[in-house]
Image (cartoon, helix red, strand yellow):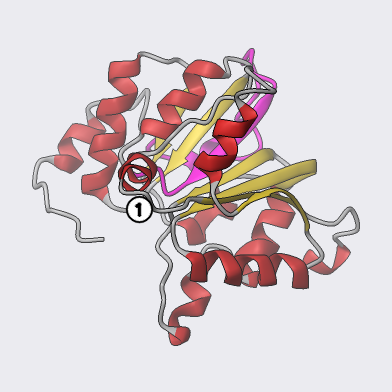
């Protein structure tokens, strides 16, 4: 993804310290303390912020944190968050490799990976957010019973992710090879199920591309992850 430089981005982000957390390490292990929300949910790679703000507006019982490493993209996330006027969503300008400096072990209830960079070249496999090194980190940070949702339009990344999850002993649930087709069927049986789309998801689905989705939970015995 090519990111257009915005010279004013840093100053703009610093002007909203109540939303864009400047020192997340200070909150590590204490994100929920003193708050009404009961669970911490983290979107890794929040893009333009549609999913983050949409989920926060629907789930007032959860605290949502969006992480994005590109400063110029964080601006869009912030604008979407301010427009939505939700109080339970915050933003970190951080790299996914630094998750453990922001969150303590067994602090996060759910991770969301939405249309992450597939890094298609084999030599870049370790950069994929579902590589085993990242899975080990999620395992340490997730609460017992917590899990991870993956959505992507990239079949190669989806197949790679399933293999990585399986090799680590994760349990796969709600696996879909065409999410929107499945949702059309689900609407007839479960009117309470709502899918919050990202900007990429809307774009790709309108072009008729299948969206792949799954929910994965790490094994109960995670001693080998520590």
Q: Residue at x 73, y 55 (%)?
A: 140
Label 1: how many residues lie within 10 Å, few (<14), some (14-19) or many (20+)? some
Q: Is residue 41 magenta?
A: yes
When the figure is inspected, residue 176 is found, relative to residue 66, above or below; the finding is below
The quarter of the picture where the C terminus appears is bottom right
Residue 88 makes an appearance in the image: no
- State the residue in front, 199 or 75: 199
Quarter residue 107 falls in: top right
Seen at 59% across and 72% down, the residue is 160
Rendered view: 215 above or below 59: below
Query: Which quarter of the figure is the N terminus placed in?
Result: bottom left
User: Was residue 44 drawn as part of the magenta stretch in this picture?
Assistant: yes
The secondary structure type at the circle numbered 1 is loop
- The answer to whether residue 162 is visible is yes
Which residue in the protein does label 1 denote? 69
In this view, the residue in front, 34 or 45, is: 45
Relative to 128, 69 lies left or right: left
Residue 129 position, x and y percent, is 52, 62
Query: Residue 219, located in which quarter of the rendered image?
Result: bottom right
Residue 137 lies, in percent from the top left, at: 65, 60
Q: Residue at x 50, y 66 (%)?
A: 155
Q: Residue furthest left?
A: 7
- Location of residue 183 in the rendering, given as x and y in whole percent from the top left corner: 57, 34
Q: Nearer the viewer, residue 87 or 2?
A: 2
Q: What's drawn in magenta, residue-wise?
A: 21-47
Q: Quadrant of residue 23?
A: top left
Residue farthest toward the bottom in the current orientation of the protein: 123
Magenta span: chief secondary structure? loop
């Amino acid at each position: 993804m090519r990111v257009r430089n915005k010279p004013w981005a840093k100053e703009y982000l610093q002007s909203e310290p109540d939303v864009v957390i400047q020192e997340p390490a200070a909150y590590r292990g204490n994100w929920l303390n003193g708050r009404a929300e009961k669970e911490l949910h983290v979107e890794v790679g929040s893009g333009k912020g549609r999913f983050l703000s949409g989920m926060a507006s629907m789930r007032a019982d959860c605290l949502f944190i969006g992480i994005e490493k590109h400063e110029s993209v964080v601006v869009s996330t912030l604008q979407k968050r301010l427009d939505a006027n939700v109080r339970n969503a915050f933003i970190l300008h951080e790299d996914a490799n630094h998750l453990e400096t922001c969150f303590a072990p067994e602090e996060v209830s759910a991770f969301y990976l939405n249309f992450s960079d597939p890094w298609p070249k084999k030599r870049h496999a370790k950069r994929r957010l579902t590589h085993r090194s990242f899975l080990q980190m999620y395992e340490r940070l997730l609460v017992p019973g917590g899990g991870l949702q993956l959505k992507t339009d990239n079949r190669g990344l989806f197949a790679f992710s399933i293999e990585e999850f399986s090799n680590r002993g994760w349990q796969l649930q709600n696996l879909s090879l065409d999410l929107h087709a499945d949702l059309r069927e689900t609407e007839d049986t479960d009117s309470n199920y709502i899918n919050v789309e990202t900007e990429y998801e809307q774009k790709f689905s309108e072009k008729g591309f299948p969206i792949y989705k799954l929910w994965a939970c790490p094994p109960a015995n995670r001693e080998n992850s520590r």
